[in-house]
Amino acid sequence: MSLKTHDGRAPRLLRGRGATLNLEGRFARTVRVRDAEHVQAPAFDPDDLDHKGDRAQIATHVTPIRARSILSHNDSPDLPFHTSINPYVGCEHGCSYCYARPSHATLDLSPGLDFETRLFAKTNAAQLLREALAKPGYRCENIALGANTDPYQPAERDWRVTRSVLEVLAQTGHPVGIVTKNALVLRDLDLLSDMARRGLVQVLLSVTTLDHDIARRLEPRASSPTRRIETLAALHAAGVPCGVLVAPVVPFLTDDAIEPILEAAAAAGASRAGWVLLRLPHEVRTLFRDWLVTHFPAKAQHVMRRMQAMRGGRDYDADFSTRGRGTGVFAELLEQRFTKACARLGLDRDRRDLDTSQFRAPRPDVAASPQLALF
């Protein structure tokens, strides 16, 4: 099995970026092909490129947008939620494995470097949320915040879209579950601790590895592994129910960290845990293979062969019943290791559900709607 770079070029390291190329999405109408005489040419706009020593750095562009809706719904049987909110399109964390990357192709942008450098902030998210929660037929159930892209990615420091969404949820007594890789979540402890006292929130920190060198390459703009564990401890100290998501598990690269991550999380106060096997849908397959060859050439073939052993001989199997865990003996071993570690550390005992009984629909905005409130 050959695992050459995507287009035969010499590997190019991009400062603070996960993707090593900017391949066209599956809906692209045109395809760019490198001339053999210019294989070193960047696959991105040279105007966006700065140089730091011998490594390239690409600037991040965030564009404000007025979204049409803010609640996303799914009927996937393997997900523990049906409704989610994604304050941002794209994610600056730049995780090389991110299963959300293919969504950028629907915007005629690349799931590669574009996904982590050309972002969109839904500046009207709070307004749309109020309108959705005020609808007469709305039924309260747990909302997942950041199911596709991270709600606390670096752009949130300036744009504060996630903060505005949390404020609405807190005001209406609406439960929410948060998943993030960023310590920025601690900025909102004032809201989170108050919601926690009312049984309205839980926070999961996604931790892939405790090895800082691997994390720097794998998730270049996410908080460091140590900082994420410290964030768990700070959440626990503030009374916010928290847990750890060991995700994704990458064979031969991060699978040896399952037990150490769970042990560190439990010591920090985590009360629950989950895990997800590496997923490589659509363009992520090419992107991750290229990333492997660039950063871990000696392990690349081993990783992909083991992945195929857990995916029915393919790089990825999208079947809902197996996409998060895989199949076969190696997948079963990962599940056993995780289950036994959780039982030993007490991470399988927290089964509390968030409270939906406190929800009170927001009053309609009379100024924005001709329909007056009855009471």
Image (tube, helix red, strand yellow):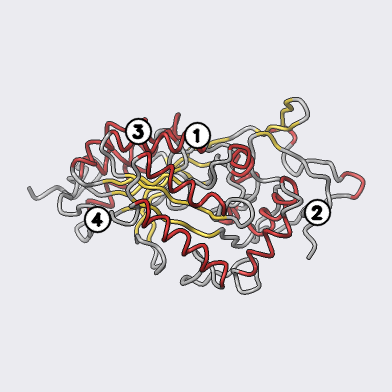
Camera sees residue 118: no
From the image, which quarter does the N terminus lie in?
bottom right
What's the amino acid at mark 3? Ala
> Is 83 situated above or below 326?
above
Q: Secondary structure at mark 3?
A: helix
User: Label 1: how many residues lie within 10 Å, few (<14), some (14-19) or many (20+)?
Assistant: some
Q: Secondary structure at mark 4?
A: loop
Looking at marks 2 and 3 on the same chain, the residue that comes earlier in the sequence is marked by 2
Alpha-carbon distance for marks 4 and 2?
49 Å
Q: Residue 11 at what x, y percent from top left?
A: 79, 44
Which residue is the site of mark 3?
234
Quarter residue 102 falls in: bottom right
For residue 310, side relative to residue 148 (left or right): right
Q: Residue 259 at what x, y percent from top left?
A: 48, 51
Alpha-carbon distance for marks 1 and 4?
30 Å
Q: Nearer the viewer, mark 1 or mark 4?
A: 4
Given contact means CB atoms under 8 Å apart, are the residues at marks 1 and 4 in contact?
Answer: no
Looking at marks 1 and 2 on the same chain, the residue that comes earlier in the sequence is marked by 2
Q: Secondary structure at mark 2?
A: loop
Looking at marks 1 and 4 on the same chain, the residue that comes earlier in the sequence is marked by 1
Which residue is the site of mark 4?
353
Which residue is the site of mark 1?
154
Which residue is the site of mark 2?
7
Q: Nearer the viewer, residue 200 or 35?
A: 200
Residue occupying the point 17% across, 45% down: 363
